Amino acid sequence: MKIVVGLGNPGAKYNATRHNVGFDVIDALVERHAFGARAKSKFNANVNEVMIGMTKVVLLSPLTYMNLSGQSVRAAIDFFKLDLKDLMVICDDLNLDVGRIRIRAKGSAGGQNGIKDIINRLGSQEFPRLRLGIGRPPANWDTADYVLGKFDEHDQVLIGDSVRQAVKACEFWIENDVQATMNRFNADPSAKPKKKQKPGKKPADTQSDTENKSTD
């Protein structure tokens, strides 16, 4: 059994905002796997229990507002008595470009208040998370206004693509492990594939892979 949690704020005025992309991924998973079943109200969250492959999965959208997301997550983990490796948390990320996703096996909150509250209430950073890039706010924009704002027409296309990619990543993680999921889904989609060297041809000097990797 596994739990997939999407972070966001409840209420119609927050629908389709940058801060609610976690909810968007859960909604897409529900549409694919719940077959019209209505969500239950449990753990101060909307909850759907579905089968993905051979695994029972709890799809959870906390109704606590972003900054108190840990209340619902803690309650669900305690109820189902699951290990934290079986928890995947989905949220927005200001430090990733729109259209990018990034999976990590563990780590700090990175400025994301929902993740921060989950870490505080679980007493651990040792759980997987999937971040969807929403980009940085323009100069002189208030960060809170930016994350609670909606995507423009161009970014709507990009975020739609990343939501679909995040759904595939969650489905893959459910049947595999987080390392395999990172290996498969963390690549930059804009990166050009490397050309194969012809036999006997000396490769040009390049930076090491370590130097080229992003540190976010």
Image (cartoon, rainbow, N blue to C red):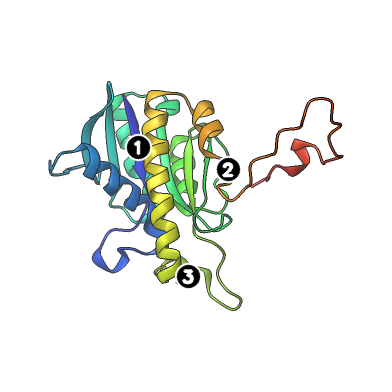
Q: Secondary structure at mark 2?
A: loop
Labels 2, 1: front one: 1
Marks 2, 3: nearer the viewer: 3
Specify whether 35 is left or right of 211: left
The residue labelled by disc 1 is: 4
Say which quadrant the N terminus sits in. Answer: top left
Q: Is residue 200 above or below residue 149?
A: above
What percent of the width, then of the height, locates residue 156? 40, 64
Q: Is residue 105 visible in this depiction of the protein? A: no
Disc 2/disc 1 C-alpha distance (Å): 18 Å
Helix, strand or loop status at disc 1:
strand
> Separation of disc 2 and disc 3 at Cα?
22 Å
Q: Is residue 121 above or below residue 199?
A: below
Residue type, mark 2 in image: Ser
- 10 Å crowding of disc 2: few (<14), some (14-19), many (20+): few
Q: Which mark is residue 108?
A: 2
Q: Is residue 57 left or right of residue 127?
A: left
x and y percentages locating residue 204 in the rendered image: 85, 39
As shown in the figure, which amino acid type bears the numbered disc 3?
Tyr
Q: Residues within 10 Å of mark 3 (few under 14, many from 20)?
A: some
Write the residue at 38% across / 24% down. Answer: 175
Q: Which residue is mark 3?
A: 146
Identify which residue is drawn at 58% across, 51% down: 190
Which residue type does callout 1 highlight? Val
